[in-house]
Image: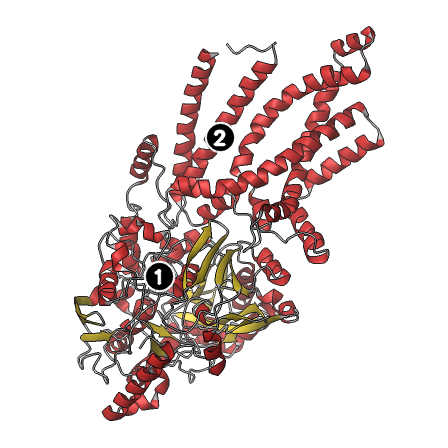
Amino acid sequence: MSRFLLGRLIQSAILLVVVSVIGYVILGLIPGGPLSQFGLDPGLTAADIERLKEQMGLNQPLWMRYLDWAWKLLHGDWGVSLRDGTPVLTVIARHLVATLLLMGSSTVIAVAAGTWIGIRSATRRYSAFDYAATVGAMVALSIPTFWFGLVGIYVFSLKLGWLPAGNMYTIGDASVLDYLHHLILPSLVLSLVHIAVWSRYMRTAMLDAINQDFVKTARAKGVAERRILMKHVVGNALLPMITLAGVQLPSILTGALVTETVFTWPGMGRLFYDSLGYSDYPVVMGILMFSAIVVILGNLIADVVVALVDPRIRLA
Amino acid sequence: MTDHDHTTHLLSRRAALRLGLAGGIAGLGLPHLLGKPAFAQGATAKEAAKKAPAGRVVVGITQEPTVFNPLMLKIEVDDGVHFSLFDALFRIGPDGVITPNLAAEVPTQKNGGISEDGLNWRVRLRDGVRWHDGRPFTAEDVKYTLELITKPNFRAWRTAGHSLLRDITVVSPTEITWRMEKPFSPYLSFLTETFIVPKHVLETAADPNTADFNKAPIGTGAFKWGKRTAGDNLELVANRDYHGEGPYIETLVFKYIPDLTVFYTQFKSGDIDLTGQTYITPDNYKEAKTLPNKVVTLVPRQTIETIYFNLEKPQFKELAVRQALYAAVDKGAIIDALYYGVPSVTESYMPRSSFYFNDKLPKQTFDVKAARKLLDEAGWKPGKDGIRVKDGVRLSFNNTTTSGDHLREQVQQFLKQSWADIGVEMNIANQPAAVLWGDFWAKSQFDTVIAGVTYMVASDPDVTNRFHSSSIGAKGGRGSNTAQYANPEVDALLAKGTGTFDPEERRKIYTRVQEIVRHDLPFMPIFQYTVPLGHKSSVKGFVPNPNTRTESWNAAGWSRVG
């Protein structure tokens, strides 16, 4: 196990270096840069722009900027935002809570509903429910989230007036109930796609398990159908789902740009998009590295958990 | 002198008296350019002032304010916050009037605040003003502020004007003087957007670029720092000890809504009380006007929609070519069909609201025949492919604007056809904003660009930065003359304009500059932006001000009814 972990650690480190180089170079090669948005400011002269470039260290060659940034990162200094001088980790932390709230709740809904639909579809294969679930999943997957979001706002906010038209809380209220009220629509909309994905995977995994010999053996032994389903089938079907969860885990922390935009949710997705728009290199790179680390960790955790729960797998 | 109303009355009376004695005829002819309370809206405002501030106004904006040190590099939405948290020495009203704010009077050559040669300035300050932390505001703070802006390591926003200051001297807590390296009349306007910061807070910071102050600022403004939810909103609370008029509302919230469709939806649903900075889009204007309990007004902006020529490109060196291209543009059709008739047609770079606007410029007439004739006479003959040629130069060029700007993309299609009609080829070559407004624009790497350009800095008519031949970035200049325009007469007039303090004299100068620029056509003026701004009818005291960059310049005067 420890050898496995060490190997993974080295792999991950190399991966992070590659990600950081590619990210930094691509970002640096895009013409324009953080000061181009001031190109039309009538009072900011070309001389002012040159001065700011120098103050921000933007007039240095790309490789020097990269090395400087990477060296500081190795020492735990993630840099400061070029927009307002806030430390990058503070900027990320400020947006992380909102994203956790939205993605966390939608993931809980998605996993619960998706698993249930998947199991039911598999056990009642080709039933009306199964067909409805299949069609529903296709619809949820093919219609863009922003459309669901806008329709949701139109129906439940503007027409019925039941739910707020976006935002994380009512300005001046901000009670727990108020947060929950605001959370309903965006988390439901966001979970639609995840329910679709999750239910399809679950159904397939269930069908794989149902046809295994040990299920037939259990049936032949006369084990109750319910027990077969819960212990033998679902138990085995959940194994591949752990890996899937590992892949999906990072999105809980990196946010959902479209949903966050439609619902004016101040999460990580928006932060990344805004920072790209302002060419706020330190923040963009910070989010990129943060996401890369979370992806690596997510996969690692999934692998370890699978090994722990599945006695057939041993990590060398 | 603690009663504010009292103070301003005294001051205006004193100012009037001094003027009368000096017999300033020009000054009396221009009473609106002299000191008077900024947004005292008559008796109702005064009555409201006696009540405790109540209610809340949520301003919707589509960019997030993040810069709270008002002297640092910033964008328009940051300005909106700064106007509420801080005060400048002077304030500029919608009519272009400059009035005292932290200053006690507006210095002029008439009242002796500015010396005859324009070099020595003396500013008297208001007494009894306190910072949000209770410490008194003094001339030391002004000195600290003006010096901080030009500190080498400080990431300051605009430094023009400030860099001319020498020998800043604190005469007394309520009086400060300085000398300028050369006379520079626009400086008074620049000071209307130079917010004063507290010395006692900032001087203790190791690096003013990263001071704690920048995250929780302390000002003298009508509102104090409340709390910020990053990426979502910023809440300011009423400063009950404000030295000026107001505030009448308890909380002022700036709410960030990045998406334009969602922005309008939240205006409709009532989540935001007032549309700031990014306005209601023209296509929604018609519906917005019919919404119940909402007031939607058309507000002029200083920005002019233009098509810029790069005058160093061989195609555009000849005036006849520029005139022909201009004559072939149907400006009326662009405004009516594509912009829903909202903006207003213009011939000048100067906004109509300006005191210096020249309304006698020749009107462009859409005339394809005249355009063809101009090109024929100038010797541009159609080649085999129908595109005109002269001395080996094909009359073909790229046109660039921000990619993804659907309205402008339609304008481009329209221009392409119009110019094809007169034997001119235009190719569309759009670029993302971050690319376009970088070196591509600043170093004049384009052929033609469609751009919304603001020419005025803090409403001063000086345009040295845009039209002086020493301001061409592509030729090592230090300004934004991206058309690479050079005219010796304009150069001379601009130099004269910044050395002249008398508004009437300056009006003559800039009237002439507009005439020459209109004749030389370094760009084609299409229209002046007019934007629909909306607010709930329960929000009172909203006054748009084209002389500032924000709709929230007078949030101190806003109140809530019902």
**Image coords of residue A36 (percent x, y):** 38, 54
Where disc 2 sits, the SS reads: helix
Crowding at label 1, few (<14), some or many (≥20) Cα neighbours within 10 Å?
A: many
Q: Amino acid at mark 1?
A: His
Q: Evaluate whether residue B483 shows in this view.
A: no
Seen as rendered, the residue at the extreme right is A128
Which residue is at 32% across, 84% downward? Answer: B10
Read off the chain for label 2.
A
Task: Give me the residue at 64% from left, 24% from top.
Answer: A241
Residue B397 location, x and y as percent?
Answer: 45, 60
- Quadrant, the N terminus of chain B: bottom left
Q: Residue B409 location in percent, x, y? A: 54, 60
Is B178 on the left or on the right of A310, as rendered? left
Labels 2 and 1 touching (C-beta < 8 A) = no
**Mark 1 falls on what kind of element?**
loop
Query: Between residues B554 and B393, which one lies in front from this camera angle?
Result: B554
Q: Which residue is mark 1?
A: B132
3D distance between C-alphas at marks 2 and 1: 43 Å
Vertical order, B407 against B40 (above or below) = above
Q: Can residue B384 be seen by looking at this rendering?
A: yes
Q: Is residue A85 left or right of residue B163?
A: right
When the figure is inspected, residue A310 is found, relative to residue B348, above or below; the finding is: above
Check the picture and name the quadrant holding the C terminus of chain B: bottom right
Name the residue nearer the viewer: B482 or A66. A66
Query: Could you tell whether B180 is left or right of B225 in the image?
Result: left
Q: Is residue A181 left or right of residue B472?
A: right
Residue at numbered disc 2: A294
Amino acid carrying mark 2 in the image? Val
The chain ID associated with circle 1 is B
- What residue is rendered at 66% in x and 46% in y? A185
How many numbered callouts? 2
Whether A3 is drawn above or below B119: the answer is above
